[in-house]
Image (cartoon, rainbow, N blue to C red):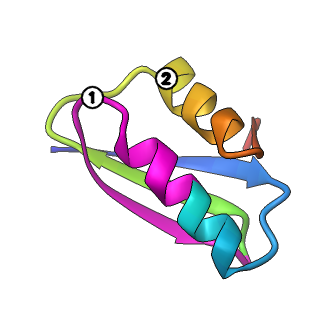
Amino acid sequence: MSTTDYAVRGMTCGHCASAVTEEVSKVPGVTGVQVDVAAGRVTVEADQPVPADAVAAAVDEAGYEVVPA
């Protein structure tokens, strides 16, 4: 199992967390998504490592931005 953390800019509420969770969950191979709005972090769990650009694209689709940690 692979777990990767991402810093995400722009999340401020539960709706933000839901939108990011929904989009990132669609990335092939992702088995779990945990969002910490207060910390601006998203943790992605997968059976195999998931390409960071795929996660960044999903976060972008939700209306937010992955930023360097």
Q: Which residue is mark 1?
A: 28
Q: Are marks 2 and 1 in contact (CB under 8 Å)?
A: yes
Q: Amino acid at mark 2?
A: Ala
| Position of 17 relative to 10 (above/below) | below
Identified at 49% across, 23% down, the residue is 54
Mark 1 secondary-structure assignment? loop
Magenta span has 34? yes
Range of the magenta residues?
A: 20-38
> How far is disc 2 from disc 1 in space, using C-alphas?
9 Å
Task: Choose between 60 and 2: the one closer to the eye.
Answer: 60
Kindly identify which numbered label has been placed on residue 54: 2
Identified at 49% across, 45% down, the residue is 23
Magenta span has 47? no
- At label 1, counting other C-alpha atoms closer than 10 Å, the crowd grade (few under 14, some 14-19, many 20 or more) is few
Task: Choose between 63 and 10: the one closer to the eye.
Answer: 63
Picture quadrant of residue 33:
bottom left
| Position of 40 relative to 60 (above/below) | below
Residue 20, position as x, y percentages in the image: 58, 54
In the drawing, does residue 34 fall left or right of residue 30? Answer: right
Q: Amino acid at mark 1?
A: Pro
- At label 2, counting other C-alpha atoms closer than 10 Å, the crowd grade (few under 14, some 14-19, many 20 or more) is some
- Which corner quadrant holds the N terminus? top left
In the drawing, does residue 17 fall left or right of residue 29? Answer: right
Kindly identify which numbered label has been placed on residue 43: none
Identified at 59% across, 58% down, the residue is 19
